Image (cartoon, helix red, strand yellow):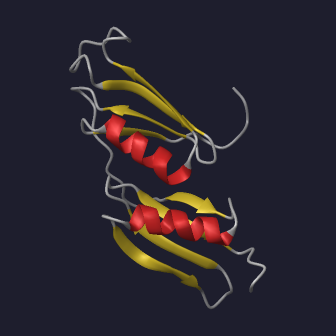
Amino acid sequence: MSAGAPGVYLLFPGNAAEALAYYRDVFGGELELHDYAAFGRTDGPGDAIAHGVLTGPVALAGADAGSDDDAVHMGGMFLSLLGTAPVAELARCFAALAAEGRIIEPFVRRPWGAIDGQLVDRYGVRWLIGSEDDPAA
């Protein structure tokens, strides 16, 4: 087991291919999808996603929830993209994720100098996006 940040693995309610393709469109990167049939799973439709991986600037993995799995629902946590890219790129990602989602806190400069915002995207995933490293500050 290697030391490092935990990976994010999301279970979707039957729309994993759509959701992971959406995140690829927002963040860029390469997407690899494998269906239940290819993995020999029988706990869902053969064309359901058994494992999907997005690699690139943002790494995510996910699948369609099996019959005994709960689909993603988030409370008391965010996926954080703090300081992971220039502020302009983070603002673009925030706007893209906010489309058809719900903004919790707008992407603005805070009294302590950071620029950040919070939202729930169209798939119910909560995000905290921002930076304290803005050359325009």
* Quadrant of the drawing holding the N terminus: top right
* x and y percentages locating residue 87 in the rendered image: 66, 71
Please tell me in which quadrant of the rendered image residue 39 appears: top left
Q: Nearer the viewer, residue 124 or 32?
A: 32
Give the quadrant of the C terminus.
Answer: bottom right
* Residue 120 locus on image (x, y percent): 37, 63
Which residue occupies the extreme top position in the image? Answer: 40
Q: Residue at x 32, y 55 (%)?
A: 124
Q: Nearer the viewer, residue 20 or 63?
A: 20
**Which quadrant holds residue 103?**
bottom left
Res 55 → quadrant: top right
**Side of 99 relative to 132 (left or right):** left
Name the residue located 32 percent from the left edge and 17 percent from the top edge: 36
Q: Residue at x 48, y 59 (%)?
A: 78
Where is 104 relative to 64, above or below? below
Where's residue 97, x and y in %?
A: 43, 61
Number of residue marks: 0
Would residue 72 appear left or right of 7 to someone viewing this image? left
